[in-house]
Image (cartoon, coloured by chain):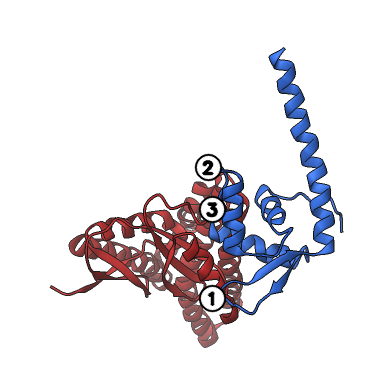
Amino acid sequence: MSQTKFIMSSGLAFSEEKDMDRLRRQSLKGWHVDGFQFMGYSLKKGESKDYIYSLDYRTLASAEENEYFEFFSSAGWSHVASDGDMHLFRAEPGTKPIYSDQETKVEKYTRANKWVIGLTIPLVLITALLWVGMVFTEDTLKTILFVAAAIFTIFAVPITWTAFASTGYVMKARGRKGVGSLLKWLPIIVVVGVVITLFIIDPSIVNNRILLSALIGGISGVVIVWVLGSIFNKIRG
Amino acid sequence: MKATEQLTDSMFYIMAALTKPRHGYGIMSLIEETTKGAITIGPASMYTIIKKLLNQKWIYLYDGTDSRRKTYYLTEKGKKVLEEEVKVRKLMVELAENGLKEVEK
């Protein structure tokens, strides 16, 4: 049996706590996380141990790292891995949480949220401009703009969804749990709503094969990755 | 800037500990000892607040020679802010104490 394995993240903007719980359960089985991977974590086989995990988001200059990690280690949290602005820590159960008050916890998710929003807004604007451009052009240019718009949409949709979920986390940290959950699912509701509305306004949309396949492709792409990831985790887990 | 900008509890505790030059761990353990474990400051909260207080210029880097254990100290402005905050908090403690005494009667 291999001594390392990979588990997929459920998407940190969507389920940070769930991911941290899963890492704890893996540690109980002797699989300890040792790094971030693309869309997940790498784990290493060792002795079974009960560890709790916590994640922090923070941009650190290299001159700040020593002090930052020292704060954590002196409080009983050892540094596991970092990837860009994400820092993962583990500790013995019962160690005091890394955030002890609501104000700084809200700031944690606000920092992460700013980053996601900063990525989402330009992407959505470009995508919208491409679609508008497509409507007002003809022939070859129209086709080019259409393909570009479809490609951008495939990226814009999941990132927008992430931005909503991440904003939901900020709301939740502020103690507005209901609004937080709503924001997490709102994009799906909106997409389904828009598709239904489009269909009612212009049923011939079904005949537009390129548009339809772009939509199906985009949605099924996300679903396939998700389902495969879950199955993969179940089998290996 | 208004001197009356609301301090959070954690900010107040950390500023109270920085009436002498101290490093992060020193601040955390002093707060915990003083309150007999009733109040602890998590490392991520601690780091966030230190950065914020530096930004506000209420504390400054007192000694940065040991990159793991930098020490911080209140600025003159920080001392004033803390003094004001102590006054307000004292009033609220008095309110609670007097109120409780009346309940006992």
Nearest to the eye among marks 1 and 3: give it. 1
| Residue ID at (49%, 82%) | A143
Q: Left of B105 or right of it: where is A104?
A: left
Q: State whether discs 3 and 2 lie on one chain.
A: yes
The kind of residue tagged 3 is Gly
Nearer the observer: mark 2 or 1; the answer is: 1
| Residue positioned 55% across, 67% down in the render | A116
Residue A169 position, x and y percent, is 53, 54
The red-tinted chain is A
Say which residue appears at 60% left-offset and 54% top-offset: B30
Q: Is residue A236 visible?
A: yes
Chain B drawn colour: blue
Quarter where residue A117 is shown:
bottom right
- Residue position marked by numbered label 2 in the rendering: A178
Disc 3 on helix, strand or loop?
helix
Q: Measured from the top left, where is residue A177 in percent x and y?
A: 53, 44
Which image quadrant is residue A170 in? bottom right
Label 1 element class: helix
Chain letter of disc 2? A
User: Is any part of residue A189 visible from this angle?
Assistant: no
Which mark sits nearer the N-terminus, 2 or 1? 1
Which of A188/B99 is in front? B99
What amino acid is found at the position of numbered circle 2 in the picture?
Gly
Question: SS class of the residue under badge 2?
Answer: helix
Residue B4: x and y, percent? Answer: 83, 50
Residue in front for this viewpoint, A123 or A24? A24
The residue singled out by tag 3 in the image is A168
The disc placed on residue A66 is 1
**Which tag, 3 or 2, sits closer to the chain's start?**
3
Alpha-carbon distance for marks 2 and 1?
A: 39 Å
Mark 3 packing: few (<14 Cα in 10 Å), some, or many (20+)?
A: many
